[in-house]
Image (cartoon, rainbow, N blue to C red):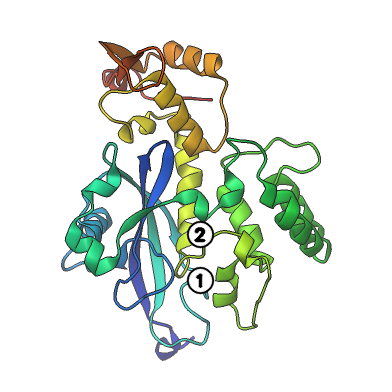
Amino acid sequence: MARSEIAPIAIGLSAAVVGLKDQTPLILTLREVEGTEGKDMLPSGPFDPLRHRTFELGLRAFVEAQAGLQIGHVEQLYTFGDRGRHARPDDEGDHVVSVGYLALSRGAAPEDAISAQALKLSGASFQPWYVYFPWEDWRTGRPVVLDRYLLPALSEWAAQGDPTQAERLKLAFALDGLVWDDERVLDRYELLYEAGLIEEAADGRDTVVVSDLFEHTGRAMRFDHRRILATAISRLRAKLKYRPLVFELMGDEFTLTDLQKTVEALAGRHLHKQNFRRLVEANALVEPTGTSSAQTGGRPAQLFRFRREVLLERPASGLRV
């Protein structure tokens, strides 16, 4: 390919910023950045090496500018650059390669940290992440949307393709007696995208894709941002098992019930109370504060704090639930 025929490349930075309120996992979204009204989108912007010494510093600057929020833990996820995932194939302009990040807001009540100016200018807000992935929340049992809508349509799609599609469907959605893997969020999203069952699939293809299942397959996001979010949820669910990241989202003091419900909310599944508490004790992740909370509606519950010394005692510690 001659140099003049090479499509110009632009590097974008996108952040999946996770917060928590009332045991509900939240994701920071924008609505009106640079005229992109309509679908939710993640905080993002172009990387400028003249202004940003590193990708991470650029990302933190975008989040603070667009939401007035200073984030805590940040880690790079993946580079997203598939054709058609950012704009329609026939659109002119640079081909955007997005570097996705997982970030955590600091402490409880994340929406209180969003500045009034950011709320007005960008529509910044925290949204429950299960509105984008309703099939991922198993806390009260198997989601109805799976058997009523998703699996029949996916099975029909897989039967029309090569055998690898059926095998991927079986693994991702735990068919034929397999156990549901909470970390396969991205795998499940990709299958729905390829089958044309989510709204973003209609934006990224030459042919028109219209499905009556769009209303049941979660709220759409701008560009490939729901794919980035799926990757972030997969990463966070995995890291909860070997890193104490959950405490980044907790307040300074909490009950063990609060901690369990937080882990359940992030993992999307119910945990056995006594087994969970034995696990917490065995890992020595928390210590009592000597005080209790009367806000539990029953007997006062003992309050705990995260033992930060554990980070120095051993290289890896988490809640392998």
Q: Residues within 10 Å of mark 1 (few under 14, many from 20)?
A: many
The kind of residue tagged 2 is Arg
Distance from label 1 to label 2 (Cα)?
A: 9 Å
Q: Quadrant of residue 247?
A: top left
Q: Residues within 10 Å of mark 2 (few under 14, many from 20)?
A: many
Residue drawn at (76%, 51%), measured in percent from left and top?
A: 167
Instruction: Kindly identify which numbered label has been placed on residue 85.
Output: 1
Q: Nearer the viewer, residue 165 or 54?
A: 165
In x, y percent, where is residue 133?
A: 55, 52
Q: Is residue 120 left or right of residue 310?
A: left
Question: Vertically, is 153 above or below 284?
Answer: below
In x, y percent, where is residue 37?
A: 37, 75
Question: Are circles 1 and 2 on residues that touch, CB within 8 Å?
Answer: yes
Q: Quadrant of residue 163?
A: bottom right
Provide the secondary structure element on which disc 2 rests: helix
The kind of residue tagged 1 is Arg
Residue drawn at (36%, 20%), measured in percent from left and top?
A: 255
